[in-house]
Structures are given as C-alpha cells and as structure tokens.
Image (cartoon, grey):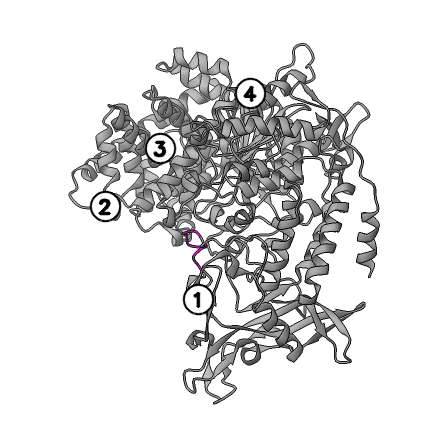
Amino acid sequence: MKENSLFDSLLEEPQKPSGPVTCLGMTFENDEARRAHFTEELRKNLQDPEFRKIEGFPIGSDEDILNLSDPPYYTACPNPWIGHFIAEWEALKPGQPDGYSYHREPFAADVSEGKYDPIYKYHPYPTKVPHKAIMRYILHYTEPGDIVFDGFCGTGMTGVAAQMCGDRDAVIALGYQVKQDGSILREEIDDNGITKWVPFSHIGIRRAALNDLSPAGTFVTYNYNTPINISSFEKTASRILKEIETECSWMYTTKHSDGRLGTINYTVWSDVFVCQECSEEVVFWNAAVEKEAGKVKDEFPCPHCNSRLTKRSLDRAWTTVFDPIINQTQKQAKQVSVLINYSVGSSRHEKVPDQYDIDTLKKLEALKVPYWFPSERMSFGKETRRNDPAGLTHIHHFYTKRNLYALAKLKSLSPSAKFNLLITKVSFQITKLYRFTYQSGVWGAGGGPLSGTLYVPSLVKELNIIKQLKNALKQRRGISHPATYGSFVGSTQSSSAIPSIPDDSLSYIFIDPPFGANLYYSELAFLWETWLRILTDNKEEAIENDSQGKGLDDYRLLMQKCFAEAYRALKPGRWMTIEFSNTKASVWNSIQTALLEAGFLVANVSALDKKKGSFKAVTTPTAVKQDLVISAYKPNGGFEERFQKEAQTEEGVWDFVRTHLKYLPVTKRQGALMLFVPERDPRILFDQMIAFYVRKGYPVPISSQEFQVGLSQRFIERDGMYFLPVQVAEYDRKKMTSGAPQQLSMFVSDEASAIQWLRQLIKEKPQTFSDINPQFMQQLGGWSKNEAQLDLRELLNQNFLCYDGKGPVPEQIHAYLSTNWKELRNLPKDDPSLVAKARDRWYVPDPNKAGDLEKLREKALLKEFEDYKDAKKKLKVFRLEAVRAGFKKAWQERDYAVIVAVADKIPNSVLEEDPKLLMWYDQAVTRMGGE
C-alpha cells in the first residue's frame, strides 16, 4: 500500500519545461531540438556505407541505432563527434601557471574499495571497477578539465569517477582533505616519520570519452553519465508501472490459507529427474534438499522405491511442448514449482503451490503475449549455447510466461531510450538464471545469477517483475550524481581503431580490458542486447574464445591493436592505468607484451582489491585474489626525438635509463613498511631497455655486463636499486624513518628465479655452500617441468664468486663480517682470523668485476643454444636462459629465422608464459613478414 501511495504522488508532480541549450557551439530552442538535429546528422552518417565499415560497428538497423542514441553525447554506434568534444574541452581547460611542467610518479599505493556502493550495485555487468577506486587514480594523474579515456568502459564507472572528482563530499569521503582554494590533500609520512597532509590535486570535474564494443555496455554508460530529470522520469515510470500492474498483477496472485489473496514475492522451481530403478519422477527439491540444514545431500533415497540416488546418476525428466513463437515442438528439461513466498499486507508467508496456483500457471501457458519481445536463437558460443541440452535454445525460453509478458509490456510502453535502463536492469534478474540459495541461515537470501556464466540452476528463484521494477525505480534516484551534459561523450565500436580521437589529445587513460578467456562478454550481454535490438559485432572482441576461433595469439594481437590506438591518442609523457584480473600467467604476459609492442613502458604494478570476486576468480585454483594494476607511460616527445639520433650509440641506452628512472616510484609502502621497488632492479632495467630497442627495430648497442658497469658509473645505487641524483636524496630521507626496504618473498621455479633468489640470499650475507644448500633445496618444489634443473654448484659457479682464502678478503664479505662479529672489526682485510672466517663464502661480485663471469656464462649458454638449433625433435626439457641468450644473439645478427625455428621446437605454453621469449619471437615474425 505504501508503494502505491508513493507512485500515486509522483503521478501528480508537474513536469518542468526544457529551456534553450547549447551543444558543440550551437544553441537550440530546447533539448528536444538538439536531439532532433543531431539525430538527423547521425542518420546521414548511417547511410554512408563507409561509416558502417568502422571496426566493431554493432549489428542493428538504422532506426534501432537512432532510437537508442542521444547524439552527439552518446551513439549506439561509432560516435562521429568525439573529436569535436575533445577540441572544445581542450579550449575550455583552465590555464596552468607559467613554467608549469606535468610530472607524476606512478600511483604505487595498493587500493581497496568495496563493491557495495549504490552506484556500483545498481546495474549488473560481468565485471567492473568501483568508481571510488578509479577516482583515486584520476585525481592523482589529472587536473580539472583534463580528458580521461576508457576504451573498455563497460557500465561507465570511469566516467562517473571523472565527474565525481568535482564533488567535494565525494572526494572527502575517500579520506582526502579539500581546502577552500580547491586543493586536495592526502596523508603522507614526512622525513621525520610524522604524518602530514600534502597537496597533490585539485577539485573539479574531468571530461570523459568512453567507448565499448558492447551496445549494452555503452547504453548503461550513457545512463550513468548524463543528467536526468529524476522527478519527470519517476512520474512517467510510475504511470507505466501502474499500467503493467493493472494488466499483470493477477499473474502474481496466490491464495492464503484463510482465503485472502496475497502477492507473490517469488516462486521456487525445481528440476525433476527420473529414478533409474523404478522409472518414477524425483523432484529434486523434495528428495535431495535438507531444508533445515540448508544443504543438498550427496546421496538421497528415491521417494518411490528407496534406491540410493545421487544427482549425477539421475536422468532428467522431460516435457515436450509446441512453441508457437518458433513454430516447432520443443523438448525441454522439466521443472515444477515447489514453493511460493508471498505477502498478505505487511506479513510474509510461504506455501506449497496448491490448485489455485496450478490453475493460474495453466492459464498463463495458454496466454499469448500481445507485445514484441526478442525470440532469437541464442548466438553461437560456449555460454550462449550452454543450455541447449536442456532445451533452452531461444531468448524467450529463459523467462517464465508471466515475466516475459510483463517485460514485453514494459518495452511496449517505454517512451524513450532512457527507460530501457529499467529493462536492462531487471531483464537478467528475472530469468531462469536466478539461483535459489541458502545464506545466513535463510532459504531465499542472496542468490542471483551466477556471475560470468549463463548457468541455469536446479533450483530457480522466479522473482516478481513488478516488485523488481518498483525497486529499480526507487534505486534509480539513489544512483543520481552531479552529471552534466557536455562532460561525457560515448561511442560504440572497437577500441582498436577510433580515428575520430585526435593524436596526442588524451590526458589520461584508465582501462579494465578483457581477461583472456575468463569472460565471454558478447555472449553474456546477448540477453540484454536482444531487448535493446542492437548486438555486439564480436569479430574485434579481444578475448580467447574457441567458438570465435580466437586463441591466445589472437587475443594478444587484438589487445596490441587497442593499446597502439591508446598510445597514438595519449599525450606524450602521460599515463595509462590498466586494471587486470587474470588467472593465467600466459594471459598476463600477453598483456605486458602487447603494451610493450604498442610503445608503452611499465613503471609499476600494484594491487586493487575490489572485495568481491566473480565466480571464476573465486573458485579457479590459479586465480589471483586481487586485481593487478599496471601503471604505464608514453615517453615524452623530447626523448623520442633524441632517441632517433642516439639509438645506435651507447648514449641512447643511458638516455633511455635516465628518462625511465624519472617515471618510476622512488619508494613503495605497505602500511608503515618500505618495500623494494623491483622496477629499479638493474636486471629489470636492462630487460626494459632491450624491449624498447627491439620494438624500435634497433640492435642493442651494449652487453649485459657493460650495462651493469655503466649503470653503477652513471647512477646512484641504494639497496640494489638505482636512482637519479634528485631521487636518491628523497629515498635516503624516507629510509631513515622507515628502515631498509623489505624484499618480497620469492618463488623459485626456474634458473632465472633461482639466480635471483641466490643473489638476494647472499648479497647482504655471504655464505658457504653448506649454508646455502639446505635453504636452496627447500625452494625446489615448484620447478617448471620444461626447465632443465641445474646443480647448485653450477648455478653458483656461473653467476657468483667464492673467496678461496687467497689475497685480501673481498669488500662484500668484509662488510658483512665486520658488522656482525665485534672481534673482526677494524682488522685489515688480510688478517688471518678474518681470512679464516671468510674462506669458502659465496658473494655477489660488484659490477666492475662481474664482466668476465658474465662472458663465461653467456658462452656456456650459447653453446647449449647451438644444440637446440641442431635438434631434430621437439624440446621437452631445456635451459630457458640458453634460449633467451640465443634469441638475443640471433636478433643482434638479424637471424630471425633461427628465432622462429627454435621457438617452434619448444612447447607453446613456455613461449606464451615467458615475456622475453614472446617479445623476441613476435618481433622476429614481424621482421620476417616485412622482408
């Protein structure tokens, strides 16, 4: 009764007229005139055959695209006005003070934001990042008026975050302070260990250009990121809901024990099976579920013959019906209603369906839906065809008759595109995908469709759509935020080619790209998109999907195209944040390789905890528990110009290192602890330099040992990391208050990680073989099956030095002994007692003395590589370091055929999971193709 009075009052509220509006420099009498003008302009574009050839153009008629669009702000196809908005926004940006030069360190802090904010929760989607988390990145990297881009925008949380950067209360809620002049301050620990508030950004909206391949995604994005006259919307929606209720409420009526009528909240449907012993039907809910304990029995008796049954051993019961929609007889897995939860007045009750309910269901089945609804065959795919064996082959099969009827009625009454949001909001919830579950001691609590799948459960919770629509309307007011027309532009196309975005025009990019084979987005969106009447063209969908004929290589190449487009459009010296939740090392390496091939350089990797995982992220054994966040930058134009002149000289190497160090975080923290910054490790710096040279197509003009020596001569080393002079002072100050950086624990799985583990072990504490060996043996449990396992002595001999007691004690050992034994302090390095204590200890040589050792090791590796070149069979076990050394030498000699030939001999999984090998191989294939 309360609900009805609320909607009645809304119906009485007058609608405010629209006044003059200005859009892209043109003034219109009202917003309707603006929409009409740009709709006609879009119609002209749609009639151009070349326009429809743009990559990722969705599948739909001109009229359906026009009906869903709100041009020029949002189009359900490629948006021809993106460049116009970017030019206007750039002209409107507030000026910077004289001498201003943009510089940001990567946002290196781990971020944790929950998924339970009303804005985040309102509309379901396979995966999304909380807008509050994205706000932290946008505030760090941008200033008011800057242009933010997200090419995989999903439901548009990046746009929400960009606009809410202008909301003082929202910024303060993140734990920041906002001063009267608009400065935003965050807590930092100063050189004396005292927490202080330090300015880092300014309050003010950022402009958002958002794109996605999915029409469903961009449509929801549009609704989240454009203003709405909520009172007018509620008034119209309430009128529509009243019409639906008048026509359909009888469908959700049941009879209480005293004869009064009640309103159904939900109905539970159960699978029906057949006992193999007696051939009688077994209702799953009745036979297999322990109601009070809230669990399904592993084994249960047949209610007819008492045979012991398991769900796996049972055959389904089937029902055969004629489907007039598709004009054919359909065999479907049988389900029956077993429980009704309903309300009489304000009290809730439960009952087993009685004759009244059975009669209602029969009446419904005989009813013809007089309104349009989607009845397409489910598209070809793993998820979309998941339920074919159960006879759920077409869209309308996923709905009960009454929910289909009411949803079709809503679609017929919706006066504008914005009202389709109510349809997409509930159209997934009211399907047969909704699970009936037991949570917190209550049946019916929780549930919902299983995230990331189109799984139909054995116990289905059929929700009352009228109640769901009323709840959706109430929640719609709760997701309103200070969005403004002209601060967002949305497009629907592939991110692999958006020519309407000018070169070097974007201030910052935040993307949450697809996760390899984790989620099949176009399949999961198919149900929504059939109601919107526009479908994803999945040819350019960047995923692994057997149904689409796409493997890991296809995924990597598609992502590389998207990253290359992002690189083209991003301003030099600016940042891109890539949020990524993966479950396989090969997918993670594909993303990093694609980034490098596009031109980006990675400066930091940190964690983002979204506090709630999808089904696959939670249950897959190899799944990461937190999303990883890559901070990558586009080198500034000055460096690129210098590199063209210096590339084939050693100075090009040091210019690269100098530029790269400038972009790396000086420190990383985990609470009060200071962490080691792996990106400053000399080996990682060397790998980054090689990757940059290879991508540019130049031979590397310096060896590993020369790089190590040159690094120590030109830059300042602290705790195994290298810094610029201006950075090392800051590092030293922070180290004084926080202590030495903590090394992250390592997992030894191959030769390279074993060398790194040994280096970390003996760098600060030189040890004898007998000290090292037992520790090393404990690390060998996870050794890769294809990696040749080396003897510890061989690893030590090829990579480190051992003091044999002849000559003075090496400085590394002397420093350790004199620090830890009082009696050895101040002794000369050739003192017999010091020599005796130091003898047979292994230590890390300094760069100036490591050259000869490196040459000997490289010679041994290349000798093994020659054996691999001559091998006639596939290689099952080999030294990965030898393959890397051989690939590098072949690259220097431009012998690309050798790289490809040896790559063909090693397992594909090894190639895919090793970013260095993948880089050499991809570039070799590219060069061979161009010759």
Callout 4, which amino acid?
Answer: Ser
Q: CA distance from mark 1 to mark 3?
A: 52 Å
Asked whether, in this view, residue 447 is left or right of residue 473, the answer is left
- Crowding around mark 1 (Cα neighbors within 10 Å: few <14, some 14 to 19, many 20+) is some
Specify which label sits upstream in the sequence, 4 or 3: 4
| Vertical placement of residue 165 versus 424, above or below | above
Callout 3, which amino acid?
Answer: Met
Q: Which secondary structure lies at badge 3?
A: helix
> Which residue is identified by label 3?
919
- Which stretch appears magenta? 379-386
> Which residue is identified by label 4?
505
Specify which label sits upstream in the sequence, 1 or 3: 1
Callout 2, which amino acid?
Answer: Leu
Callout 1, which amino acid?
Answer: Gln
Label 4 with label 2: CB-CB less than 8 Å = no
Give the camera-side residue of 571 and 319. Answer: 319
> Which residue is identified by label 2?
875
| Vertical placement of residue 478 versus 339, above or below | above
Q: Residue 736: where, in percent of width, then height? A: 65, 31
> Which residue is identified by label 1?
330
Depth-wise, is mark 1 or mark 3 nearer the camera?
Answer: 1
Q: Residue 442: where, in percent of width, then height? A: 68, 69
Asked whether, in this view, residue 349 is left or right of residue 870, the answer is right
- Image quadrant where one finds the C terminus: top left
Give the camera-side residue of 292 and 699. Answer: 292
Q: CA distance from mark 2 to mark 3?
A: 20 Å
